[in-house]
């Protein structure tokens, strides 16, 4: 049965996905930020005041010190939220290896504690996990595939999935593929590549790193649909195109009519100096989420056209 309505807490609203969620959800979103926004007296005043969520000012939640938020949540009426997306994380791979204690607290312990506090209020946690829970040996991973993380980031995400589910058995776990945006300043692969192509820069792109990217606009529509349907369990969020990094960079250059002059170097992941070796084939099958939400992800050609058209009115 389809259920609709209800606010959605966005725990960590200032990063790439958090911003997209808040923009798409509008008045449904109750955002949190790590610290008061400089120059906005309201956002500082609300740390701890349950009425802040009703005033529209962002709530304060530092994942490294979630106690004040958890206390405020437990004393509140839950702000009318039916779900909470646990977004904030150390989302880069190497820092999780290089700073294990900080990132374990941020990526594993905080989501577990928040999930427990949310469940106590009847608010369903939605945890954003990653394709890095897989080893990248075979690709085309479905929800039935056995995780086997090869990086500290992947191990943290898998551990967090397990702890969130133990703390809140009706949590929704979304394993995200590489998410692509079309905001010129979002720092994602296509918009960054567009800038490099326009500047005539050399672009090194691996031919042995595969993923199944999805547009951030489709991700946020799917999350809203999951909330409104009351969906439970584990879903892979992935597009239908399985591409390597070199392939997608080349597709964008072709779409921008810049392929001929572009200096796109085919490299291997082995040529890149990462702190930890990267899994190679992290493609996932997103069929279950597509069927559940009824949202057909934009294909890579259409997304490249969209990014190529940036600034053309
Ligand atoms: N983007 C992808 O392709 C992708 C793929 C798979 C999974 N994911 C997962 O999706 C989630 C969001 O990713 P993203 O790409 O949007 O990441 P992002 O742009 O790097 O944003 C990270 C967010 O975490 C917040 N944060 C960091 N430390 C914090 C703390 N101590 N307290 C509160 N907030 C803190 C940041 O806040 P500040 O602005 O204050 O630093 C920011 O809002 C992550 O869980 C990530 O692992 C993303």
Image (spheres, grey):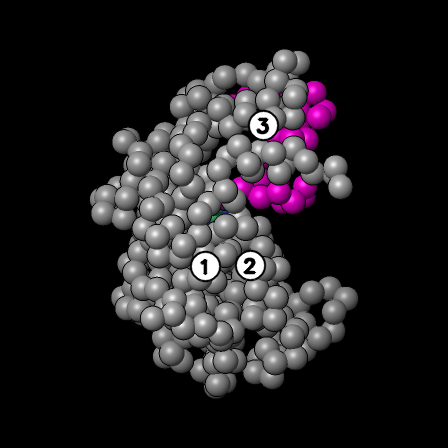
At 36% from the left edge and 36% from the top edge, which residue is drawn?
A: 283
Dots 3 and 1: beta carbons under 8 Å?
A: no
At 33% from the left edge and 46% from the top edge, which residue is drawn?
A: 287
At 63% from the left edge and 36% from the top edge, which residue is drawn?
A: 307
At 77% from the left edge and 66% from the top edge, which residue is drawn?
A: 39
Secondary structure under badge 1?
helix
Q: Residue furthest top?
A: 260
Q: Is residue 86 visible?
A: no
Query: Mark 3 Cα within 10 Å, few/some/many (few <14, many 20+)?
Result: many
Number of numbered discs overlaid on the protein picture: 3
* Residue that numbered label 2 is attached to: 21
Point out the stretch of residues depicted in magenta: 178-205
Query: Mark 1 Cα within 10 Å, few/some/many (few <14, many 20+)?
Result: many
Q: Position of residue 262 (x, y in %)?
A: 63, 17
- Determine whether the beta carbon of the residue marked 2 sits less than 8 angstroms from the nearest atom of ligand 1: no
Dots 2 and 1: beta carbons under 8 Å?
A: yes
- Determine whether the beta carbon of the residue marked 1 sits less than 8 angstroms from the nearest atom of ligand 1: no
Q: Is residue 168 left or right of residue 107?
A: left
* Residue that numbered label 1 is attached to: 223
- Residues under labels 3 and 2: Cα distance? 25 Å
Disc on res. 252: 3
């Amino acid at each position: 049965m389809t259920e609709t309505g209800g606010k959605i807490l966005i725990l960590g609203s200032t990063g790439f996905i958090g911003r997209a969620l808040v923009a798409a959800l509008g008045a449904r979103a109750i955002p949190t930020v790590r610290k008061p926004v400089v120059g906005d007296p309201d956002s500082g005043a609300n740390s701890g005041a349950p009425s802040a969520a009703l005033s529209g000012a962002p709530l304060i939640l530092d994942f490294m010190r979630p106690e004040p938020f958890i206390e405020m949540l437990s004393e509140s009426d839950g702000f009318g939220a039916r779900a909470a997306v646990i977004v904030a994380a150390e989302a880069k791979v190497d820092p999780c290896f290089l700073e294990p204690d900080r990132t374990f607290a941020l990526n594993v312990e905080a989501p577990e504690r928040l999930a427990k506090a949310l469940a106590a209020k009847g608010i369903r946690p939605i945890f954003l996990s990653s394709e890095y829970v897989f080893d990248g040996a075979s690709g085309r991973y479905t929800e039935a595939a056995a995780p086997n993380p090869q990086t500290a980031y992947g191990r943290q995400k898998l551990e967090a999935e397990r702890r969130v589910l133990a703390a809140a058995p009706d949590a929704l776990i979304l394993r995200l593929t590489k998410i692509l945006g079309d905001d010129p300043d979002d720092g994602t692969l296509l918009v960054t590549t567009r800038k490099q192509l326009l500047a005539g820069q050399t672009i090194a792109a691996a031919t042995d790193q595969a993923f199944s990217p999805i547009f951030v606009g489709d991700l946020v529509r799917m999350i809203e649909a999951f909330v409104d349907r009351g969906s439970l369990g584990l879903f892979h969020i992935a597009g239908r195109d399985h591409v390597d990094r070199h392939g997608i960079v080349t597709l964008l250059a072709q779409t921008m009519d810049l392929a001929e002059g572009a200096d796109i170097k085919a490299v291997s992941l082995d040529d890149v100096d990462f702190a930890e070796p990267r899994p190679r084939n992290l493609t996932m099958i997103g069929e279950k989420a597509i069927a559940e939400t009824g949202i057909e992800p934009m294909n890579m050609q259409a997304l490249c056209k969209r990014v190529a058209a940036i600034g053309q009115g």
